Image: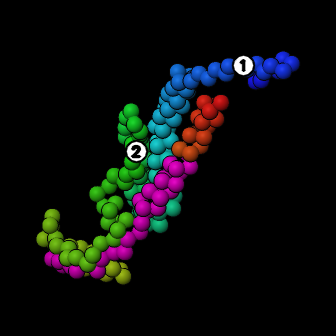
């Protein structure tokens, strides 16, 4: 600011100080809020991805066992982030997801295999299975969870930035 006193000009000294301490306090509060929310974001995204797999999986599940074993959960949280997983905890889940190649089936716990086809009972020591086509459900669950994770993390970050960006 300049002051004019007649023909003399008087100058006012300007002072500028940093606000490092305040800035770091806000940065740390922002980081803590984002980090604190990440566990919830990961847990929600995994749970919703698992629900997506249960709902839209087009596989036949005669016993309901496979669908009941699909779960999404938070597996850990560290100083730098959070981890989660979506699982289908049955031994045959990967066969349903990816399919199987043609393969031989041999009788193991009995002398013969037994099955019913077109009302007739058949027996054999071994049969050739033609394989199965995969019915993906975990892949789509992952894609759903990934999209949700990005969107939820963005919302979390924007809310935190709005609180501490003033």
Q: Above or below — where is 63 with respect to 23?
A: below
Q: Nearer the viewer, residue 17 or 31?
A: 17
> At 41% from the left edge and 40% from the top edge, which residue is drawn?
82
Q: CA distance from mark 1 to mark 2?
A: 59 Å
User: Which one is earlier in the sequence, the residue at label 1 or at label 2?
Assistant: 1
Q: Quadrant of the N terminus?
A: top right
Q: Secondary structure at mark 1?
A: loop
Q: Nearer the viewer, residue 88 or 151?
A: 151
**Label 2 crowding class (10 Å Cα cut-off): few <14, some 14-19, many 20+?**
some
> At 34% from the left edge and 52% from the top edge, which residue is drawn?
89
Q: Which residues are magenta?
A: 124-152
Residue 54 visible to an observer of this rendering: no
Is residue 101 found left or right of 40 in the rendered image?
left
Residue 6 lies in what quarter of the image? top right
Q: Nearer the viewer, residue 12 or 113?
A: 12
Image depth: mark 1 or mark 2 in front: 1
> At 16% from the left edge and 71% from the top edge, which residue is drawn?
107
Q: Position of residue 162 (x, y in %)?
A: 64, 35
Q: Are marks 1 and 2 in contact (CB under 8 Å)?
A: no
Residue 87: assigned label: none
Residue 72 visible to an observer of this rendering: yes
Q: Position of residue 60 (x, y in %)?
A: 43, 66
Is residue 90 found left or right of 24 in the rendered image?
left
> Disc 1 designates what residue?
12
Q: Position of residue 108 (x, y in %)?
A: 14, 67
Is residue 42 found left or right of 2 in the rendered image?
left
**Label 1 crowding class (10 Å Cα cut-off): few <14, some 14-19, many 20+?**
few
> Disc 2 designates what residue?
84
Q: Position of residue 55 (x, y in %)?
A: 51, 58
Q: Is residue 151 magenta?
A: yes
């Amino acid at each position: 600011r300049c002051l004019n006193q007649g023909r003399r000009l008087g100058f006012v000294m300007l002072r500028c100080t940093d606000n490092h301490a305040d800035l770091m306090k806000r940065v740390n509060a922002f980081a803590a809020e984002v980090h604190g929310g990440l566990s919830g974001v990961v847990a929600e995204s995994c749970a919703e991805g698992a629900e997506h797999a249960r709902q839209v999986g087009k596989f036949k599940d005669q016993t309901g066992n496979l669908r009941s074993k699909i779960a999404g959960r938070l597996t850990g949280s560290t100083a730098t982030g959070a981890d989660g997983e979506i699982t289908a905890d049955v031994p045959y889940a990967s066969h349903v997801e990816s399919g199987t190649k043609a393969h031989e089936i041999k009788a193991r716990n009995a002398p013969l295999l037994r099955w019913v086809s077109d009302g007739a009972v058949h027996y054999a020591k071994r049969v050739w299975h033609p394989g199965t086509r995969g019915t993906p459900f975990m892949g789509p669950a992952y894609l759903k969870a990934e999209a949700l994770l990005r969107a939820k993390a963005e919302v979390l970050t924007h809310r935190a930035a709005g609180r501490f960006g003033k």
